[in-house]
Amino acid sequence: MHCVTDSSTWINLKNAGLLKEALRLPFVWLIPDVILEEELDDPSGKWLEEQGVQRCELSGPQVELVAEMAVRYLRPSRNDLFALVQAKEEGSLLLTDDGPLRKAACAEGVQVHGTLWVLDQLLSQALINKRTAAERLRRMIKAGARFPAEEVARRLLRWEGERDGPEPESA
């Protein structure tokens, strides 16, 4: 699966301490060059590329499409629209936690998910356990991530209310 990302997902994963785990997911990670160069300091765009995230450069017609979308969608940043156009043109999934970008993606018929979905994928691939997922979600929220309250509550209830496996035997 090809996933085009904006900066929000990488920042949230970094704040959760889950960058390396996320990069082990069976995805082809793509990110527009303008986001790599202009928006990412920690993690740096260079570091992400060294880990296998692929830089995308939009063609002239794609940049024109970004300009057209900027007239239709006033709230996503121009750089965010680069990610939307890349995902739309590639038929890829768009990963973002930016509300206005998610709305624009839906209007454009682009499949969109965010960091909560990435946490679900990390669990389904057994790259983290439920306790870690809950702890890291709380860490992201403490660092300022804003997710839908119902989605957070549902996940925390499920992850903190279920055990990952049998209790270790006590001596």
Image (cartoon, rainbow, N blue to C red):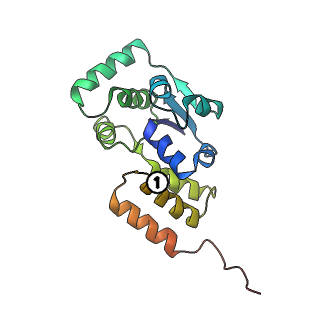
Q: Which residue type does callout 1 highlight?
A: Met
In the image as oriented, which residue stretches furthest toward the top? Answer: 60
Looking at the image, is 48 positioned above or below residue 69?
below
Query: What is the secondary structure assignment of the residue under circle 1?
Result: helix
User: Which residue is painted at 33% across and 22% down in the image?
Assistant: 66
Looking at the image, is 158 positioned above or below residue 115?
below
Q: Is residue 94 visible?
A: no
Q: State the quadrant of the C terminus.
A: bottom right
The answer to whether residue 126 is left or right of residue 101 is right
Q: Looking at the picture, how far across and down is residue 41, in whole percent? A: 51, 33
Q: Is residue 12 visible?
A: yes
Q: State the quadrant of the N terminus.
A: top right
User: Which residue is painted at 32% across and 30% down in the image?
Assistant: 77
Residues 156 and 40: in front is 40
Image quadrant of residue 100? top left
Looking at the image, is 147 positioned above or below residue 37?
below
Q: Looking at the picture, how far across and down is residue 33, in whole percent? A: 49, 23
Residues 144 and 87: in front is 144
In the image as oriented, which residue stretches furthest toward the right? Answer: 171
Q: Looking at the picture, how far across and down is residue 143, in whole percent? A: 44, 52
Q: Mark 1 highlights which residue?
A: 140
Image quadrant of residue 14? top right
The answer to whether residue 162 is left or right of residue 21 is left
In the image as oriented, which residue stretches furthest toward the bottom? Answer: 171
Q: How many marks?
A: 1
**For mark 1, does the 10 Å Cα neighbourhood hold few (<14), some (14 to 19), or many (20 or more) residues?**
many
User: Which residue is painted at 51% across and 64% down in the image?
Assistant: 134
Q: Looking at the picture, how far across and down is residue 56, in whole percent? A: 51, 24
Looking at the image, is 138 positioned above or below residue 82?
below
